[in-house]
Amino acid sequence: MELVFIAGQSGAGKTAAAAVLEDLGYYRVDNIPLTMVEALIDELRKSSFERICVVIGGYQLTSRQLDLQQYFMELSRKGIRVRSLFLCADDEELIRRFNITRRAHPFSGELASALKEEKDSIYRWSEFFELVIDTTSLSIHQLKEKLVVLFAKGQTPRRLTISFVSFGFKYGIYKGADNVVDVRFLPNPHFVAALKEKTGLQQDVYDYVMEAPLTGEFLTLWQQVFDSLFRWYIQEGKSYATIAFGCTGGKHRSVSLARYWSEYYQQRDDYHVFVYHRDISHP
C-alpha cells in the first residue's frame, strides 16, 4: 500500500495537490487526525484500495506531542510505502491568493500575522517530508504537471528528482538533506551595506557571490562531485536527492548557490529539479 501525506502552508496548494492525486486514482482524505490513519488503512484494505492521499491540517502540525519523523518510520515498518509532500509559498504570494479567494486564514486574526504564526508553527516539520515544493511561481496547471510526473501510477521517475535547499546555520541545520554543503567560507554580502537587506534572489547579491574567485573554484569542484553523485544515484535506482547549502543566515550565499545549481540542472534532461529557500524570510 502507498500512503501520501500532503501538508504545508494554507494557500500554498494543498487542496489543489490532493485533487490531482485523487484524479490519479488515490483515495483522498482531508484533515483526518493522524491517530485515525491506521484504522483508515485497515478499513480501506478490505475494499482493495492500495493508494491513499491524506491531507494533514496545519493545526495537527502544531502539536508538541507530534513526532512526525517517528510516525512515518512506524508506518514504513508496517509495510506501507510512505511518501510525503510539503507545499509552501512566500508571504506576498499567499496574501495575494487569500485576497483573491476572500477566504479566512485558519489561523485567525490579521492575515500577515496568521501567516507568520502558521509558518513558525509548522515549518520545523518540512525537513521530514520527502518533497518540498515552493508554489510561489507555479500556476495550478504547472503544479499538476509536476505532481503527475511524481505520482502517476505505473510511471517510475524517468529522471532523478533533485531538491536544492538553502538554509541558515543560525536557525539549525537542514535535517532532511542527503548532503549538506557549508558555504560560509564564501564572501558574505551581509557586510556590504548596499546588499545586507537583500537576498540571493536579487541579481546584485547573486552577482556578488557568484563572481568571487573562490566561488568559481567551488563551482568547478562541486560540478564534478554532483555530476558523479547524481549519476551514481540513478544507477542505484534512487529517485530523490536533497542537497542543502548552508550559510550563516540563509539569505545570501546559500540562496545564491541553491539558485545557481537549480538553474544549472534544470537545463539537463536527466533531472527533475526543485528549489526551496528555508530561511530567506527571516529578518
Image: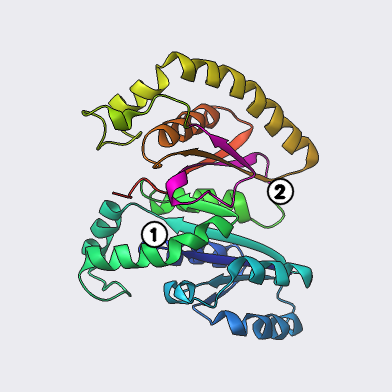
Which residue is located at x 37 percent, y 34 percent? 252
Looking at the rendered image, the disc whose residue lies closer to the viewer, 2 or 1, is 1
Residue 283, compared with residue 124, is above or below; it is above
**What secondary structure is marked by label 2?**
loop
Which three-letter amino acid code belongs to the residue tagged 1?
Answer: Ala
Which three-letter amino acid code belongs to the residue tagged 2?
Answer: Thr
Which residue is located at x 55 percent, y 75 percent? 66
Image quadrant in which you'd find residue 84: bottom right
Per the rendering, the mark at residue 12 is: 1
Residue 198, magenta (yes or no): no
Whole-percent x, y for residue 27 in the image: 61, 74
Circles 2, 1 touching at the beta carbon (< 8 Å): no
Per the rendering, the mark at residue 40 is: none
**What secondary structure is marked by label 1?**
loop
Per the rendering, the mark at residue 156 is: 2
Which residue is located at x 49 percent, y 65 percent? 7
Q: Is residue 11 visible?
A: yes
Which residue is located at x 53 percent, y 16 percent? 217
Whole-percent x, y for residue 118 in the image: 36, 67
> What segment carries the magenta color?
157-183
Looking at the image, residue 49 sits to the left or right of residue 119; the answer is right
